[in-house]
Amino acid sequence: MLNYDWHFERVIAYQEAFVVGILYTLALSATLIVFSTVLGVSVGIVLRRNGWWATPLIVVIDILKGLPPLVIILFGYFALTADVIGVTVGAFWAFIFSLGLNIAAFIADLTRASVSNVPREYIEMGSAMGLRHNQLLRFIVFPMAIRELIPPLSYLYIEAIKLTSLASIINVRETVYVAQTIISDTARSLEVWIVVGLIYLVLVTPALFIARVLERHFKREVGIAPQISRPLGY
Amino acid sequence: MSNHTTAMTGKAFVPVLSAENCTFGVPGTILFRDLCFEARAGEVIAMLGPTGIGKTTLLRTILLMNDIWQGRFQFGQDIGVESRLDGESSHVSVGKTDGRRRSNVLTEEWASDIRRTIGYVPQGSLLFPFLTAEQNVALPLRARGVPSKESMARTTQYLVRLRLNSLAERKPWQLSGGQKQRVAIARAMVAEPPLLLLDEPTASTDPTTTIEIGHVIKEYVKEGVRSAIVVSHDIIWSSTVADKMIFLGGDGAIQKFTTREMDQVTMIQKMKEWFSEPNGVSE
């Protein structure tokens, strides 16, 4: 390492390419978070009702949670093509749909747990006050569940930002893809990966700080210890 | 139906709640058998008894959170909930006293309608932790669809009444036990229900606040066709607040005293005597 001849100036010359990569990473992260949140929260709320659909849904969720993200992404990339579904979905959206399903499975599980973790005595107190079923959900269950859900969800979002790096595998021009291109041009691997690491730290650190603040805030408000989400496969 | 409703000549004789031969308990155990009592307008009733006798179960049964196995609760002159034992199961019916609306099932809608005529202060106050003191107090009004201007005015009125106006913006975790208790009482009163049920309302309050809470409850019931049932372990405080005291003993035996009829020393003596006998003495 000490014998290595550092040449960051050759990497910095590619700053415009890095900016494009960062913009793609941000677009992927935002789209992935919105897609997986809408899908996951909806499924989690549906699961609360314990109908006939609950068991098959839980099986699907467990399968999605159990598969490595890379496997799901590659499967989605090759499945969402004209040969299979009659229309070819671009790499960007293939990544969103496939990894989005994986993250949505975790969010659905967290949502279901947050709703069912609302302490029974608060729901009974609401009933004793004469609140009707919809009012119980609106005034008590959802506000408490959201406060319990947000801290683990914010950690999950941080994982989602980091997981966008896998999109390079299917040729989405995000930060890691750009980095690999620059390496092939310059052969300066260590410099490039240090820059990529710094880019991800800059993206993730503020989110991590916000997640910690939210965790402390909601822990005090709801009085329930937040669950830290498990890493998504790696 | 209580015979007082026909002889109603003044507010004091209007029953806000009548329990008529009510039998109930917890699964597998009868706690009260053929319980009869009446809470009349303007009256505060104190329920006393040893720990585990079923005081909280009694309040929860009035709130229809627990089943009545047999007997009838009459809420005001308007709604009655009746349960008849048929073999091993009991059949509940609920309806307006004038017969305009009846149901053979105690639906959530009926239960909710009845609960809206009751203000409840549970043990440990149970404030919603994500709401401020003010939002906690205002919640029953929001649930009843009271316009926001009126809701704000009423909420402020009850915050001031319970000396909570300076604490309105605080979350429950920023309040002391006594302050939480006062918020819970304001929340129970703000919709001005005819019946208040208070489970150990002075359990975590200092002596001054304990006296104040007593005054607030007494004032509240005098302001309309209202009554309050207070469960407490504090016999001295209860005797200063209540018009009637009901001592609950084992197997549902009860003894009733009217506080006007005797001084506190005699009352404590009577209670000691009563609780020293097995299962207490029926009235």
Image (tube, coloured by chain):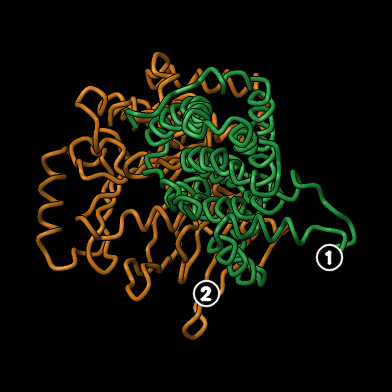
Residue depth check, mark 2 versus mark 1: number of the one nearer the observer? 1
Res. A84 mark: 1
Q: Residue at the spot x=68%, y=54% of the render? A: A98
In the image, the chain rendered in green is A
| Foreground residue among A4 and A168 | A4
Q: Secondary structure at mark 2?
A: strand
Q: Residue B27: which numbered mark, if any? A: none
- What residue is disc 2 on? B84
Could you say where residue B193 lies in the image, as x and y percent from the top left? 53, 37
Do the dots labelled 2 and 1 sit on one chain?
no
Colour chosen for chain B: orange
Residue B217 versus residue A171: which sits nearer the camera?
A171
Residue A57 sits in quarter: bottom right
> Crowding at label 2, few (<14), some or many (≥20) Cα neighbours within 10 Å?
some
Q: Is residue B84 left or right of residue B282?
A: right
| Image point (26%, 40%), residue name | B259
Please give left or right for residue A176 compared with residue B159 in the image: right
For the question of whether residue A106 can be seen, the reply is yes
Residue drawn at 57 percent across, 42 percent down:
A160
Residue A207, image x, y percentages: 50, 29
Location of residue A56 (image quadrant): bottom right
